[in-house]
Image (cartoon, helix red, strand yellow):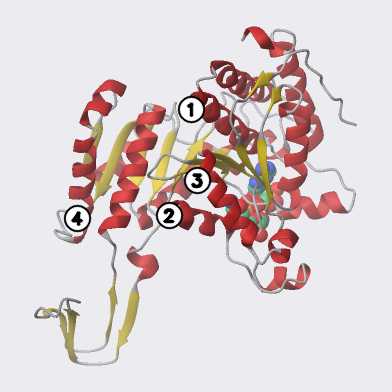
Amino acid sequence: MSVRHESAYKVVARNPIVEMDGDEMTRVIWAMVKQQLIEPFVELKLEPYDLHLPNRDRTDDAVTTQAAEAIKRHQVGVKCATITPDAGRVKEYNLKKAWPSPNGTIRAILDGTVFRKPIIVRNVPPMVRSWQKPIVIGRHAYGDVYRDVEMKIPGPGRVEMTYRPASGAAPQTIVVHDFKGPGVIKGEHNTETSIRSFARACIHYALSEKLDLWFAAKDTISKTYHAAFKDIFREEVDLRRADFEKAGVTYQYMLIDDAVARVMRHAGGFLWACRNYDGDLFSDMLASGFGSLGLMTSVLVSPEGQFEYEAAHGTVQRHYYQHQKGEPTSTNSTATIFAWTGALAKRGELDGTPELVAFAHALEQSVLETIEGGIVTKDLAAIAVPPIAKHVSTEDFINAIAERLTAKVGPRLALL
Ligand code: NAP
Ligand code: MG
């Protein structure tokens, strides 16, 4: 039932965008978004990689690695949500094995950091009154408690930690604790290379988006471990001092408890670089505080400045099963559309084609105006203020955006 909106002129993208298709409901949405909101308006050079689970299985997951390598070459990618298979999925799709998470594979190849950014619409107010602009979270995705070793201590005894240099130099040992009774211990680590890459990716994002950068840890207590993060961040920021000044962007280090307290009364509009565990917690806190998973975007940034855009949510499995049964669905495509606009705007910025950036902006505006005009999917109808009694279907939401977009840019596209 979708109406194809043709445009007289098309914006031309000069260089390729790596397109990664995915699974389930988001795969259904992906096709609609491309067909209704992108292809009629933009002449793209897409380099497609199909990360649909059966295709990952068929290629022994080589397609995922190829996609990541392509992002390295072309600098910009856009990805649909994908299934990370577990035992249930291995059976459902009759897979050779439970392939690893594509996001994990791509992140490892690009050595990237994931930034999550909420989309703010006027009629879906954040839970926290002071939040007016997005608070972006960058989460370090290596080490600490996620790569720790742990041990149960059954009774009295001494626990020590030893470093044996590969050079053959004398080992160093410190006492962790002299146990008088049972207890537990853990050993955590991180590497300078990983912390530095994380700091660089955060700096890259802050400068590219012109956002102030916050980094917080607990170096008053952890005088070596947390202090190492603080020092490396400082060094990397100092190397880019001139760029910070040029962009009018500041860097602040603070204690993590201070940062948490400040976030709750801040207007937003900054990048919060988080250590791995902090990022795990606070990205979920911000996602629910800002409204809906359907309004959360995500971008993977490599330290070299390669960008991969996607929605933060998964493949929305429950809605897909409804869709398969022929039942109507009301899935929010906003974050998927913003993944596309993020990639288009970045492509335009890197290629020096402002008309592509302007088109991306016009598409984003069309989405925001559609929602603010009261045409919303079920997830937003429930939390909108004032409440919206009637929600629209997955298709009708995209159609309404296409209509607005056509009115906005259609015949005038060449003049943007
Ligand atoms: P999910 O796809 O994020 O969906 C969880 C629930 O959140 C949905 O059932 C729905 O709630 C709501 N929701 C999420 N996105 C929505 C949207 N755009 N519009 C409306 N409602 C939305 O998580 P999941 O169902 O736990 O995971 C499904 C698959 O996604 C898994 O196989 C997982 O491996 C994969 N996954 C992939 C990525 C990625 O590729 N980046 C990330 C996370 C998960 P209601 O059912 O209440 O409507
Ligand atoms: Mg979490």
Task: Determine whether the beta carbon of the residue marked 2 sits less than 8 angstroms from the nearest atom of ligand 2.
Answer: yes
Type of amino acid at the residue the image marks with label 3: Lys
Q: Nearer the viewer, mark 2 or mark 4?
A: 4
Horizontal side of residue 224 vs 245, given as left or right: left
Horizontal side of residue 342 vs 270, given as left or right: right
Residue 9 horizontal/vertical position (percent): 74, 14
Is residue 298 visible from the viewing direction of this image? Answer: no
> Which residue has dot 2 on it?
280
In the rendered structure, which disc, 2 or 4, sits on the residue that comes first in sequence?
Answer: 4
Q: Nearer the viewer, residue 329 or 203?
A: 203
Q: CA distance from mark 2 to mark 1?
A: 31 Å
Q: Residues within 10 Å of mark 2 (few under 14, many from 20)?
A: some
Residue 72 badge: 3
Type of amino acid at the residue the image marks with label 1: Leu
Q: Does 56 appear above or below 86? A: above
> Which residue has dot 1 on it?
350
Q: Nearer the viewer, mark 4 or mark 1?
A: 1
Type of amino acid at the residue the image marks with label 2: Asp
Q: How many marks?
A: 4
